[in-house]
Image (cartoon, rainbow, N blue to C red):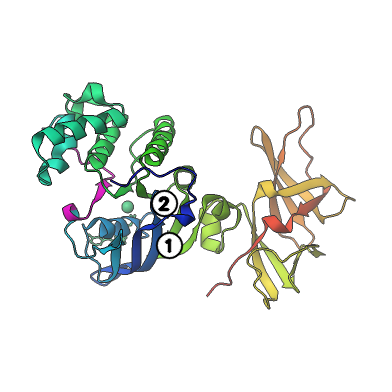
Amino acid sequence: MTDQLAPETPVQERATALRISDLVKSYGDAIAVRGVSLDLAEGGILALLGPSGCGKTTILRMIAGFAEPDSGSVTLNGRDITRLAPEKRNAAMVFQSYALFPHMTVAENVGYGLKLRKVPRAERETRVWDALRLVRLEQFGKRYPSELSGGQQQRTALARAIATRPDLLLLDEPFGALDQNLREAMQIELRKLQESLGLATVIVTHDQQEAMILADRIAVVHDGRIEQLSPPAELYDHPRTRFVAEFMGVENILDAALSEGALTIGGTRLAAEEPPVGAVPGRTGACSVAVRAEAIGLTAAGTPGVLGRIGYGTNLGGRVLYEVTLADGQVVRVSEQRAAGRPTRPVGEEVSLQFDPRSLTVLEAAA
Ligand SMILES: Nc1ncnc2c1ncn2[C@@H]1O[C@H](COP(=O)(O)OP(=O)(O)O)[C@@H](O)[C@H]1O
Ligand SMILES: [Mg+2]
C-alpha cells in the first residue's frame, strides 16, 4: 500500500499513480469508450461522472483488468498493466452490486482476495481484522451478508477491497443501493478513510453531488469521451460546454454577443476588467453563456444592470426563484435570498439584473 502522505502535500506536486492513455473499447459495432486519457496523483480521488450508458463502468473495468481495451494503455506507478490479469494489478474494485459471497462470513469475504493472492493464514487474519476495524465492522466478522444492513454490506465490500492493500481503489456507483441519509453519511466516511490511507481512488457515479463531495477532480464523461476534467468548484462555476452545464444543473444558458472581450446580454453591454471564462482571444459574435441562478444579482429597476420584468416567482424555502424576462424576450432564472417579512416580488415588476462577468462562462461553440 502507498505510504500515508502528509495531508499538506498539494495533489499537483505528488507523483502520478494512475495514467490512462487513449483508451478505446468497442462492443461489436458500438463504441463504448472513444479515446480516454487522464492522470491520477498518489492519494488523489477522481470521479468519472456522467449519465447512464456514457462509458464510465467500461473505463473502470479496463483500469481494473475486467475488460480489455482495443487500444491505449493503463499504467500504475510507472508499470504498464494494460494486459495484466486483475489480481496482478494491485488495484481493488468495489462493484456496484457489492458482489459479496452469500455462503461466506463477513471475515471470509474480506479475506477472499488475500487467499487468491496466497497470503499466509496468519497475515491474512491480521489484515482482515485491520480492514474490518477501519470500516467499523469488527463486531460483525462472523455474520453472513444476509444478516447485514445495506450500509454494512457496502462497508464489507469496501473492507474486502482495502484488505488487499491496493495501490489503487476503484469504486463503481458504491452508494447506489443506499437511501439518501445513509448515502451522505457513507460518502463522508469514505472520504475520511481515503484521505487517512492516502489511497489513489477512482469513483464512478452519475450523481453530480456525490462527485462534488468525494472527488478532488471530476471528469465528466459524455458518449465515451471526457468532456471536461476540472476540480469540483471549477466544474460547478465554469462548465465549458452545453452538455456539462446542463448535466451540472446550471439554470441558465443565455444567448449573448461577444465583442472585444466583453459580453452583451439582453441589450446591455457588461463592463468587465477581463474577458469572461471561455472568451478565447479573437472570438466575437453570437455565443451561449452559462450562469447559475444564484450568481445573478436582483435589484429594483433604475439601478445599473440588465433591465427585465418578473414573470414568475417560486418560493424554494430559503430562496425565491424568479423567472425574469429581458428586453430581447429571453427568460433568466434568478434566485434571491428570501428576506424575512419581505413579500415575493410581484409578477410584472421591473427589475435590474447584475451579472458578475467572473461568474459567467462562454460555452464552447458547438462543433
Ligand atoms: N459487455 C458489454 N457488451 C456489450 N455492450 C456493452 C457491454 N458493456 C457495456 N456496453 C455498452 O457500452 C456502453 C457504455 O456502458 P457502461 O460503461 O456500462 O456505461 P455507464 O457505466 O456509464 O452506465 C453502453 O452503451 C453499454 O450498453
Ligand atoms: Mg455503470
Q: Tell me the tag on residue 342.
A: none
Residue located at (68% from left, 55% from top) = 359
**Residue 147 image point, x, y percent:** 20, 24
Q: Which residue is mark 2?
A: 47
Q: How many marks?
A: 2
Per the model, the C-alpha gap separating discs 2 and 1 is 14 Å
**Residue 349 image point, x, y percent:** 83, 45
Question: Of all residues shown, which one is farthest toward the top?
Answer: 139
Mark 1: amino acid: His
Residue located at (29% from left, 33% from top) = 155
In front of the other: 14 or 165:
14
Q: Which residue is mark 1?
A: 222
Answer left or right for 107 relative to 331: left
SS type, badge 1 = strand
Answer left or right for 252 relative to 170: right
Labels 2 and 1: the sequence-earlier one = 2
Residue located at (76% from left, 36% from top) = 344
In front of the other: 32 or 278:
278
Residue 94 among those drawn in magenta:
yes
Answer left or right for 2 relative to 284: left
For mark 1, does the 10 Å Cα neighbourhood hold few (<14), some (14 to 19), or many (20 or more) residues? Answer: many
SS type, badge 2 = strand
Above or below residue 90? Residue 29 is: below
Residue 261 among those drawn in magenta:
no
Residues rendered magenta in the picture: 87-103
Which SS type dominates the magenta stretch? loop
Answer left or right for 313 relative to 102: right
**Residue 29 image point, x, y percent:** 26, 72
Question: Of all residues shown, which one is farthest toward the bottom?
Answer: 282
For mark 2, does the 10 Å Cα neighbourhood hold few (<14), some (14 to 19), or many (20 or more) residues? Answer: many
